[in-house]
Image (spheres, helix red, strand yellow):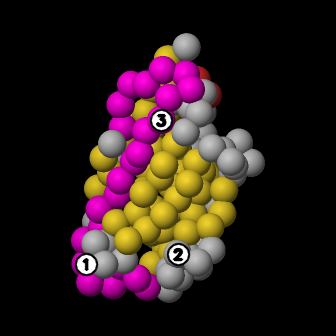
Amino acid sequence: QVQLIESGGGLVQVGGSLRLSCAASGSAFSSYAMGWFRQAPEKEREFVAAISRSGGNTYYADSVKGRFTISRDNGKNMVFLQMNSLKPEDTGVYYCTANRGGPVSTTTGGVDYWGKGTLVTVSS
């Protein structure tokens, strides 16, 4: 069992930046692939970014590629999402995710653990 707690969300203007953090419980953090999903108002939850166990491989949705960067610190049991050049369509609740055993997931069905989410609002 892993508990994931997101933080860092808030209100920003178009073109601004935010850094989301996810703190994970447990001692097996390095055995989990980590990721971020988001859900905009009245839309389905969608994949944003993922990172392998060692941090050597990262994956991004086309909509955020070049603007967002996912990273992790296994010594601190944390994963981060640096979001730059934010757009109104980036607005939504951002969820930290974990996959046991190491495989990354770009679909909600492939996620083993979910955080409760942190709200990001990008104003025009």
Rendered image: mark on residue 26: 1
Of marks 3 and 2, which one's residue comes earlier in the chain? 3
Q: CA distance from mark 3 to mark 2?
A: 22 Å
Which quarter of the image is occupied by the N terminus? bottom left
Q: Which residues are magenta?
A: 9-31
> In which quarter of the view is residue 18 placed?
top left
49 lies left or right of 98: right
Q: Residue at x 38, y 71 (%)?
A: 73
From the image, state whether disc 2 or disc 1 is nearer to you. Answer: 2
**Residue at which label 3 appears:** 17
Residue type pointed to by label 3:
Ser
Q: Residue at x 33, y 42 (%)?
A: 8
**Residue at which label 2 appears:** 55
Question: As rendered, which of 36 and 16 lies closer to the eye?
Answer: 16
Residue 21: say if magenta: yes
Question: As rendered, which of 114 and 53 lies closer to the eye?
Answer: 53
